[in-house]
Image (spheres, rainbow, N blue to C red):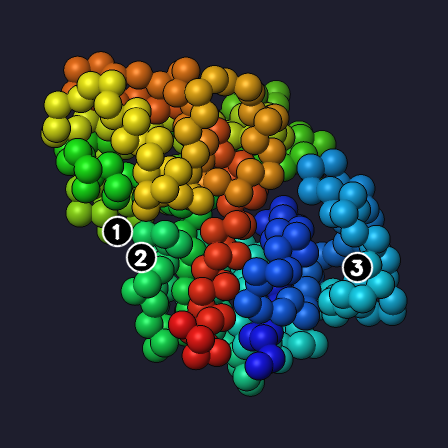
Amino acid sequence: MSKVVCGINGFGRFGLHLLSYYLNSLEKSEFELKYINDDMLSIDHALGIIKNDPYVEIHKNFSVSSDGEFLVFNDSIKIKYTNDHSDNIEWLGSPDIFLECSGKYTDANNARSLKKGRTKKVLISATSMNADQMLVYGFNHLDYSPDSDVISYGSCTVNAYVQLTSRLDKLFGVSSSDVNVIHNVPEYQLHNGFIQTPGLEKVAMKRKGCTLSQVAPKLLECVTDENFNVNYTLIPYTGVSIIDYRYTLESPLDEEVWSILESECEIGDLKGLYAVQNSDTGPAAHQNSSYSSIIIKENSFIRGSNLYLQAYFDNENSVNRFFDLTNFISLRISGQA
């Protein structure tokens, strides 16, 4: 049986990581990536990024070249590359699943315009509050509906928070929660001055809103606008990001919490999604991690009924959950799941 065909629109950080994860996961991929489009980058520019990116090192595992309008990996994997405006992509309507990774179609009404020809689904690699469904892999992806045309995977922070919180609520009962995110920025933003304010010098950091604050109360019964808060700060740094969780739990807490949490990550419902690491080896150790977040036990603690967890998460590589969701939907489309 031939595999479901996918095409990526947008070859920024997310698209680049998705390409890398796909190439390194060919044996378990239930779809074939046949198209990539970016409205800003020529094929030569894209090829240069693939060959030289210091974080996404595709070139270490694959020979990389171009052949006319194709990106070529190991001389056998060919992906058609186009440099078209999103409304006029040459291959629009050709893939079964359109992977919208440009950040320009977070409004589902606009994203729906990309569903043409044989394309059955548009998957958005960002929060879309009016998507037909928001499916967070490992939490509610089994609720997938064949009638949904436009699906959002959530976001890096949504995937880092929702599954963990849902499981903690089932195990201990969550009565309130806070999240503090120290988030990186792409390297090109540093070169462009990061964040500038008219009439002022460059800003060293910036507090922003985060879609997690809107999404979590919609997806989780234990989270409301009254018992949940997100602090989200961008800093001029390109490495792996930090996420700190605080939970007030209803069940009495003791040191057994750690063994339960470790077991959940190793063999339970959080397996493959989260990990617990005893000591802090620094953020660089978690570059390109496939986990939604890695909890550092050394920096986590219990205070009364509050559980404080410090974790690292490679927000750029949250594509692993996007890949997992695409894989699952591909199986559903092909009738194998």
Position of the N terminus by quadrant? bottom right
The answer to whether residue 101 of the structure is visible from this angle is yes
Residue 308 percent across, percent down from the top left: 30, 21
**Residue found at x 36% / y 42%:** 267
The answer to whether residue 225 of the structure is visible from this angle is no
SS of the residue under disc 2 = loop
Position of the C terminus by quadrant? bottom left
**Residue found at x 48% / y 57%:** 324
**Residue found at x 55% / y 67%:** 30
Residue 178 percent across, percent down from the top left: 28, 29
- In primary-sequence order, the first of circles 3 and 1 is 3
Label 3 neighbourhood size at 10 Å, few (<14), some (14-19), many (20+)? some
Along the viewing direction, whichever of 102 and 70 lies nearer the viewer: 70
Residue 274 percent across, percent down from the top left: 42, 38
Q: Amino acid type of disc 1?
A: Leu
SS of the residue under disc 3 = strand
Return the residue at label 3.
73
Q: CA distance from mark 3 to mark 1?
A: 39 Å
Q: Amino acid type of disc 2?
A: Asn
Return the residue at label 2.
140
- In primary-sequence order, the first of circles 1 and 2 is 2
- As drawn, the label of residue 97 is none
Q: Are marks 1 and 2 in contact (CB under 8 Å)?
A: yes
Q: Is residue 331 above or below residue 43?
A: below
Label 2 neighbourhood size at 10 Å, few (<14), some (14-19), many (20+)? some
Return the residue at label 1.
219
Residue 215 percent across, percent down from the top left: 31, 48
Count of residue discs? 3
Label 1 neighbourhood size at 10 Å, few (<14), some (14-19), many (20+)? some
